[in-house]
Every structure is written in C-alpha cells, then in structure tokens.
Image (cartoon, rainbow, N blue to C red):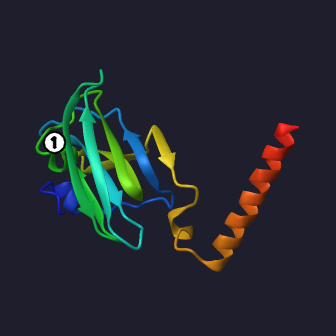
Amino acid sequence: MTSERALLQRSEPVFSNLAYSQAVLGPLSFSGVSEYSALALQNPNRGGVVVDLALYSGDGVLLGESSFALANDARILAEVSELINGVPAMAGSYVTVRASLPIQVFSVWCDEGANTVTPSKAFWRSRSSRPASDRRGTRRDRGREHHESQHAQTRQTRHDR
C-alpha cells in the first residue's frame, strides 16, 4: 500500500528489531489538513501475517476497524484514515494492533507544512520473546531457548520450595 500523502511517500520508516503481536499506539492527534497521525508496520516473518487494526476514541468508543494481509518483508507507512476505512484519528484517540505473528510497528506524527515526521513508540504492547532478527530459527537460537527453558524451570523449582 502506498500512502496518498506526499510527505509519507517521501519518508522511509526505520524499524527497531523488536516485534509485537499486540500493541496500542497513541494517544494520537487530530488529523487536519497538514497535520495527521500515521502508522508504520513491517512484517519481518518468513510468511504473511493478518493484521487487525481498531481505532478508539480517548474514552474507549470504537470508531473504526480494518483487517488486511501483510506479506513477508512488506512494510506500510500510511495515515491512520488510509488504514482504517477513511476514519481519521482524533485528539486523544488510539489504535490497537493485533497480528497473527509479531510485526514491527510504531506511530508517527506528520506535519506536511513543516515537512516533519516524528515517530512515537507503542505505550503498551505484548512483545515477542526475541527480536525479529532472531526468530528465523538458527541452531544457536534453539540452543538458547533450551537453556532459557531449563533456567526458567530451575527458578520455578526454587520458588516452589
């Protein structure tokens, strides 16, 4: 998907290596003529994911929602209204993100008049256990998972005593 906003078309989002299966982005700001909120999403997985977005008012009223597929290694940078069926973000609103596999995601505040794009991270999220770059399943990662599992079992045993 390509945004219709000129500033977003010229922008290149830089994602952290952390990925989330759930996130809440906001509070967002009012979408005006030259100022608006946008979302950046990227799928670092080997396969496609299904992404569900829901836009809520500051007091928790559902304003709009959408669901779409995001192919492997695909990224989107688009205004909130472009992603949620034409419903613009309002002052204090927030977006919930749910993905079938962890994705990289953040919100941005855009001002076309000042030619600026300012990123903002999620204020609550459910993060995957490893950075996206480690989820490809190397032998080292499997060994680390085994070690972490044994360590967690050891801690649990100590707590049970």
At numbered mark 1, what does the secondary structure look like: helix, strand or loop? loop
Q: Position of residue 50 (x, y in %)?
A: 30, 58
Residue closer to the observer: 6 or 156: 156
The answer to whether 21 is drawn above or below residue 58 in the figure is: below
The answer to whether 20 is drawn above or below residue 73 in the figure is: above
**Mark 1 = which residue?**
34
Q: Is residue 123 left or right of residue 57?
A: right
Q: In which quarter of the image is residue 75?
A: bottom left
Q: Position of residue 124 (x, y in %)?
A: 47, 38
Kind of residue at badge 1 = Ser
Q: Is residue 146 left or right of residue 116?
A: right
Residue closer to the observer: 102 or 12: 102
Q: Which residue lies furthest to the right in this view?
A: 161
Q: In which quarter of the image is the N terminus?
A: bottom left
Q: Residue at x 48, y 59 (%)?
A: 16
Q: Position of residue 103 (x, y in %)?
A: 41, 58
Residue closer to the observer: 84 or 80: 84
Q: In which quarter of the image is residue 110?
A: top left
Q: Which residue lies furthest to the top in this view?
A: 59
